[in-house]
Amino acid sequence: METFGGTITPSPSEKTAFGRKVLSENPESLGSLGIAISEAVESAVTSEGKYKYSIGSVAGPVLMHQTVVGLETLKQFEMTDEYPDVIIGCVGGGSNFSGFAFPFLHQNFTEGKETRVVAVEPTACPTLTKGLYAWDYGDTAKMAPIVKMHTLGHTFVPPGIHAGGLRYHGMAPHLCALYDHGDIEAVAVQQRTTFEAAIQFARAEGIVVAPESAHAVRVTIDEALKCKEEGTSKVIAFNLSGHGLLDLGAYEAYLSNQLQDYEYPDEAIQAAMKDLPEVDFPG
């Protein structure tokens, strides 16, 4: 961004009132997507029209925009006379995964297809697999609207893990409804086994994937190994959603044995639930 003239301010920052509040309470704060959203919204609403805030994930229009990925994948399968038994994608806020999965889910709902749809997240940020399905704020400062979603609590601050964008406390409401209804599955994987799969994939395919995408690679390999053990044959598709050339520091940490596995504790999730908003609908 700086190469092309942009400026970058790491969050939490001294540039916003909320950022200063976070740093005053914890000068060593690692920040979170929730905090960054709060700072971005504050910057927009106090700029007297100079800045606009554009949401990049979670919201319905973003999810639908991303479906070009899944729609193209359907066309690719038509060209090969194949159709996936399982599709797999990494999930953080939900837009990337939804863009890949929604067209296949549409086929499940309207054409009688039975493709399994698997979302993969880090054990350090287990929003779907451990989060409560409840009304919560989309940001830490409570400036964004409340939505019903699987959440770890808007006060959630992730540990210093190499999981790219898979560190949001909540999840796209559309995706959460599908998960709650049983239309998709979710699995959480550890950090080291994720990078192990990324290295294996790179050596086999010549592509260094982003840490986010590596989560999908991990479960794709696991699904393939399961087929091998069972003596079954399945068509498995996963979404390689980004290359890792901007994440080589994470690979260096893994290869130098500095990465540690981390599983977000249940008690921390329970503690965060006390800060959920109280919602009372008439009638």
Image (cartoon, rainbow, N blue to C red):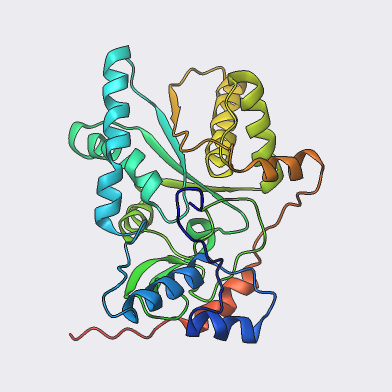
In the image, taking residue 68 as reference, residue 131 lies left or right, namely right
Q: Quadrant of residue 200?
A: top right
Q: Position of residue 118 (x, y in %)?
A: 45, 41
Count how many numbered circles sit on residues in the image.
Answer: 0
**Looking at the picture, does residue 209 appear above or below residue 179?**
above
In the image, taking residue 109 as reference, residue 148 lies left or right, namely right
Residue in view at x 61 percent, y 65 percent: 158
Residue in view at x 45 percent, y 54 percent: 5
**Looking at the picture, does residue 68 appear above or below residue 46?**
above
Q: Position of residue 35 (x, y in %)?
A: 50, 72
In the image, taking residue 123 as reference, residue 1 lies left or right, namely left
**Nearer-the-camera pick, 5 or 196:** 5
Residue in view at x 64 percent, y 68 percent: 30
Residue in view at x 39 percent, y 27 percent: 85
**Looking at the picture, does residue 204 appear above or below residue 22?**
above
Visible in this render: residue 127? yes
Q: Position of residue 152 (x, y in %)?
A: 51, 68
**Nearer-the-camera pick, 219 or 282:** 219
Visible in this render: residue 81? no
**Nearer-the-camera pick, 120 or 257:** 257
